[in-house]
Amino acid sequence: MEEHIEAFLEALRNRALSEHTISSYEFDLRDFQKFAASRSAGIESVDHTFLRDFLNHLYEKKPKLQKSSVARKLACMRTFFRFLVRDGRLKSNPAELITSPRLPKKLPSYLDEDEAATVVEMPQGSSMKDLRDRAILELLYASGLRVRELVGLNDESLDMPQQLVRVFGKGKKQRIVPFGEYAARALAAYISERNRLGVVEVEDDGQIPVFVSIRGRRLDARDVQRLVEKTRMRLPSGRRLTTHTLRHTFATHLLERGADLRAIQELLGHASLATTEKYTHVSLEHLRAEYDKAHPKAKKRG
């Protein structure tokens, strides 16, 4: 089995997938490899019944795996065996006969308006780093950008007079997103200080990255995630906060204030309206909470 796994991982590397993605595939395959070895099973003897035994083994492990983890491992098996069939190593894909476990629907976590204001106003000070961190948080909340979209921005992506940003999202699909006055002020203050210090370096393709380190290099997604994690640790509530939380908060607040779902879909860059519709459930929960709090007959008084 080792030979087949190595061939599969090499094929993934040739597709220029991230090391994180490749490591995840390898971790799941090594788990399967150990199980197969415990049963003295070679790759040719693996059928859908054997894979069901493997999934049952995962459910019975201590600590017990979540359904989402089992579903991920099954998806890995499907991709692995599909490669083996395509490469002529096997005749059929046994994983195609197995249905993925039904996953519970998770509603996106989001901040209320006061919490969001507290988060984006957390960075104080006039240093380039403080101004940059404030601009990053303001823009994430004001535009709903994905973190990789944000770090990929160049100066030419911003239309400061119109308060618009041009983004290339998943599949290199372009969209235009407004970002409002608060983010505009934060961006202007940061860019002015960045330019005054002259730290930013023009990249090989002639582009000037918007968000840079104090040494002038473009920030990556991990840099922004560390900023958000540091901000979370300073919150009095200690509640969950990620870059995606700010994206969810952006969408939820728009919906609560009457924005059209189709417009929110465009702003988020969702290919399908069904992806955006999860925010209607969040909004309904918010309305229910407000009703229970405000209506005299909403709940029985003790």
Image (cartoon, rainbow, N blue to C red):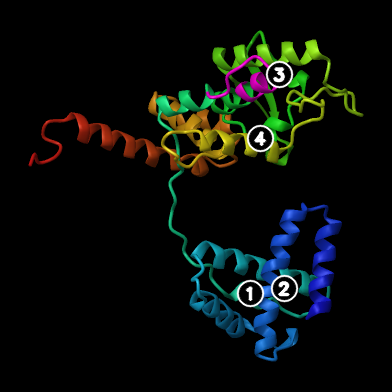
Residue 78: name its quadrant: bottom right
Q: Earlier in the sequence, mark 4 or mark 2?
A: 2
The secondary structure type at the circle numbered 1 is helix
Query: Which one is in front in this view, the residue at disc 4 or the one at disc 1?
Result: 4
The secondary structure type at the circle numbered 4 is helix
Q: Are marks 2 and 3 in contact (CB under 8 Å)?
A: no
The three-letter amino acid code for the residue at tag 4 is Val
Q: CA distance from mark 4 to mark 1?
A: 38 Å
Q: Are marks 4 and 3 in contact (CB under 8 Å)?
A: no
Residue occupied by mark 1: 95
Q: Earlier in the sequence, mark 2 or mark 3?
A: 2
Residue occupied by mark 3: 128
Query: Which one is in front in this view, the residue at disc 4 or the one at disc 2?
Result: 4
The secondary structure type at the circle numbered 2 is helix
The secondary structure type at the circle numbered 3 is helix
Magenta-colored span: 122-134
- Numbered label attached to residue 81: 2
- Left/right placement of residue 101 relative to residue 13 reads left
At label 2, counting other C-alpha atoms closer than 10 Å, the crowd grade (few under 14, some 14-19, many 20 or more) is many
Q: Earlier in the sequence, mark 4 or mark 1?
A: 1
Instruction: Mark yes or no: residue 89 visible.
Output: no
Q: Are marks 3 and 1 in contact (CB under 8 Å)?
A: no
